[in-house]
Image (tube, helix red, strand yellow):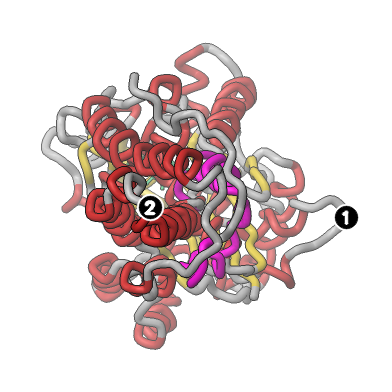
Amino acid sequence: MSFYITTAIDYVNAQPHLGHAYEKISTDVLARHKRQRGEDVFFLTGTDEHGEPVADAARDQGIEPRVLADRNAERFKKLAARLNVSNDFFIRTTDPQHETMVQEVLLRVYRNGHVYKGIYEGWYCPRCADFKVENEILEGNLCPIHEIPLTRESEENWFFRLSSFQERLVRLYAEQPDFVMPRHHYNEALSFIDSGLQDVSLSRAKLKWGVQVPWDPSHVFYVWFDALLNYYTALTYARAGEDLTARYWPATYHVIGKDILKFHTVYWPALLMAAELDLPHHVFVHGFLLGADGRKMSKSLGNVLDPFEVLDQFGTDALRFYLMRDVPFGADGAVGMAAVRTRYDTELANEYGNLASRTIAMIARYTNGHIPDVATDSALASEFDVLPAEVAAVLDRADPTRALDLIWHRVRRLNRYVEERSPWELARSPDDADRLRETLASLGEGLRAVSVLLHPYMPETTERLLGALGSPATEFDRALFAEHGSGARISPLEPLFPKQ
Ligand code: ME8
């Protein structure tokens, strides 16, 4: 089965912050999990490079937008690599193939009669690249998201007839109650639609930094239309000489933050209808990482945490684990270095790391470096029986935090099992030899099974550990707790999460 998953594409007006890392990691966990289950996954991420947000930032720095885009796109690419994100392609909206496809699709929308010329007047946030309606504007005429002054804009634009899709959108929401998840965001999107849709600007006349409107070269497309289309255009050129559209379109999951809900749950399906393209199956909406001041972590608020700093100090898997564990997917959550340290020490080092090192050490010492090839403890095994199916079901609802919690309960269970069985006591008496072998077979097996489930979260660490256990396979069906110890030969393992 094909499974096409995307992240939002990040503005290159500034460097990446931890909020960007969070979205890429959550999407990666879902993509890796689906790959484990044998699905034909395509995972797309990238950068959004046109429009005011980038043009204005470049002007402020006295450089060309292209130079700023090139510089920051590199940083986003580097971040994705350091986060060990397994994307199949990285799109940049300045890719010429993307630009050509945007023109092609929007020309079709124009020819289908969904575009007209009009005058737009309203309050505009150049950072959001979005017009604001009166009731969302903050006191002092500030943007509700960036808290910067809005500008009064009036210009002749090409308009997209969003209003004419009202009924079809209402029908879509009625027929597909899981189109937007979680539920409260579905309700938010639907009530936006129900409140009455107005036509929206499709082009900008004053701006030069964008994709040219093919039927009116004095305009460029409004950046959001160019950006949204990335999900579609990427498939046409991600593989040289191959068009992946038939294989992967429509997208299965779009993962986005809640500030861009309207674009993905209203504009985007309407645009696809106008272009006669199939609609995505689901839009998954996550919350915000909050800075120390309790506000959305954002470049313009100056409260960002640099992901590279966290990575340098704690490593990739610790950051991945921390973000998936500490910020429930779909909700907002405060983050900070002290909290990363706490999770690192208490859970990664003391619980998982310690379980791994003592299991390996005991097998080396008591059973000659082999995981005993004997029946595992059936009572313990039964506590793991339902785990893979539960994890899969929860991840199918895009809830990586809950799935991780289910897995972590079993990590703790295994640590308790070590205490209950006290293998070092059993090793003292030859009468307990069978019980010792059963205990170590069960620990080896439990550790292997939870590590297969943890693989999407902490790919590198779990690969090291599974390698040391002599069972490197990470396919999902390997997450079952087997009735027999593997008999594999273990090899030495450096501490997974060294004390710092
Ligand atoms: O919105 N916590 O770009 P962007 C969690 N280019 N997620 C956050 C976050 C935070 N503090 N700050 C940002 C754009 N994000 C457009 C998207 S898609 C066709 C175009 C998330 O760089 C944000 O919600 O401002 C969005 O999903 C993504 O990072 C990119 O944000």
Foreground tag (2 vs 1): 2
Q: Name the amino acid type tagged 1.
A: Gly
Closer to the camera in the image, 116 or 383: 383
How crowded pointer 1 is (Cα within 10 Å; few <14, some 14-19, many 20+) is rated as few
Residue 430 numbered tag:
2
Residue 197 visible to the viewer: yes
Q: Which quadrant of the render holds ligand 1?
A: top left
Residue 258 lies, with reference to residue 350, above or below; the image says below
How crowded pointer 2 is (Cα within 10 Å; few <14, some 14-19, many 20+) is rated as few
Asked whether 79 falls inside the magenta stretch, the response is no
Residue 118 visible to the viewer: no
What stretch of residues is rendered in magenta? 456-485
Chain-order first, disc 2 or disc 1:
1
Residue 199: percent from the left, percent from the top?
41, 64
Residue 387 lies, with reference to residue 155, above or below; the image says below
User: SS of the residue at dot 2?
Assistant: helix
Marks 2/1 in contact by CB < 8 Å: the verdict is no
Q: Name the amino acid type tagged 2.
A: Pro
- Give the residue number, with chain letter if any, for mark 1: 241
Q: Quadrant of residue 31?
A: bottom right
Residue 116 numbered tag:
none
Residue 181 lies, with reference to residue 63, above or below; the image says below
User: Is 389 positioned to the left or the right of 12 in the image?
Assistant: left
Hey, which residue is sitting farthest top in the picture?
62
User: Is 96 positioned to the left or the right of 412 in the image?
Assistant: right
For the C terminus, the image quarter is: top left
